[in-house]
Amino acid sequence: MRKIFLSDSSLQLLFGPLDENVRFLEKLFGVTIQERDSMLSINGEEAAVAALEKILTDFSELTDKGQAMTNGDLKAAFRQIAENEALSLHDFFPKMQLLTAGKRQVTPKSLNQRRYIEAIRGNDIVFGVGPGGTGKTFLAVAMALTCLMEKSVSRIILTRPAVEAGERLGFLPGDIEEKINPYLRPLYDALHALVEGEKLSRYLEDRTIEIAPLAFMRGRTLGDAFIILDEAQNTTSEQMKMFLTRIGMRSKAVITGDVTQIDLPAGRASGLIEARKVLGGIDGIAFCYFNENDVVRHHLVRLIIKAYQRHSENAADGRENGGNK
């Protein structure tokens, strides 16, 4: 058994609503935690108790310094430390917190999200590949805004290919801007979640933040900018090459996509899939991959993604077995 002293404010944050954080730690490490007179008693296997003692010691140091942490961020950090004993809370707070001066703070919720942020910080071009809901675009936008606020770039450029998923643009009502807006809406949603309304309006008005379809990038050189290409699975090979060769000096680019959600016409190769084959191994370009364990939407989304993956694998096995008959 180990005993750890925590201040009253630290205890209140640690336990959380209805003691949910402590119950989460007990389940995660297979221990029991009891509190009496600001003293925590931890019982369980020696290795688990020692790991948890380190977490709580770091937690106490951070909270005593006034470090802000939400329950969601704490749970995400606890989970990742349990998966990788080399990590500590000091690796997350404040190191992994983004937008500390923004509308909300953002921290990675999974080990892959953490690697993604580290890759963006350490490389000029990063590909984030995986299913929807894994935070690829949201974290990229948060990183872009962080770089803007830190003045490491002077502008943000967000773009998407305008590919018809079942409808043709020509048949949609309105002018060209109204036709294209639905394709760009998710980028606006991410910005609205992260930036105060008045500041965002100012950024959009003076083009500090620019949102435009991929076709509008042709012929430009995008320097001193953080550039995000979203839904990159719907780029053609030519479009992907065009985008990558727009990147100018002092710029970063993040390319996100889900190779299971390609809306290109039959026979057209995805530029994202080709880029993985062509660009792998180039220094300064990183590829990060996400899976259903990284989903941060409704808990059922993770199960839905997993079910569809099983269905696809079973269908592929069926075709293979049928072809061998």
Image (cartoon, grey):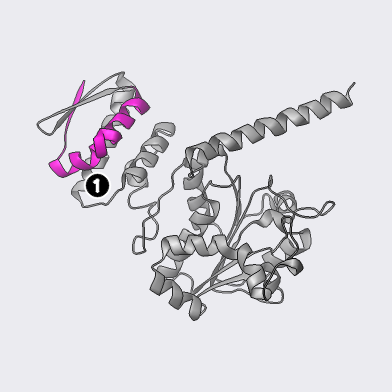
In the displayed image of the protein, which residue is found farthest to the right?
A: 325
Residues 269 and 67: in front is 269
**Residue 308 visible in the snapshot:** yes
Q: Main secondary structure of the magenta part?
A: helix
- Report x, y in % for residue 169: 73, 66
Please provide the residue range marked out in magenta: 1-30
| Residue 217, picture quadrant | bottom right
Mark 1 is surrounded, within 10 Å at the Cα level, by few (under 14), some (14 to 19) or many (20 or more) other residues, namely some
| Residue 25, picture quadrant | top left
Pointer 1 residue: 62
Q: Residue at x 48, y 44 (%)?
A: 296
How many numbered callouts? Answer: 1
- Report x, y in % for residue 20: 29, 34
Element assignment for label 1: helix
Q: Residue at x 67, y 67 (%)?
A: 214
Q: Is residue 112 above or below residue 215?
A: above
**What amino acid is found at the position of numbered circle 1 in the picture?**
Leu
Q: Is residue 24 magenta?
A: yes
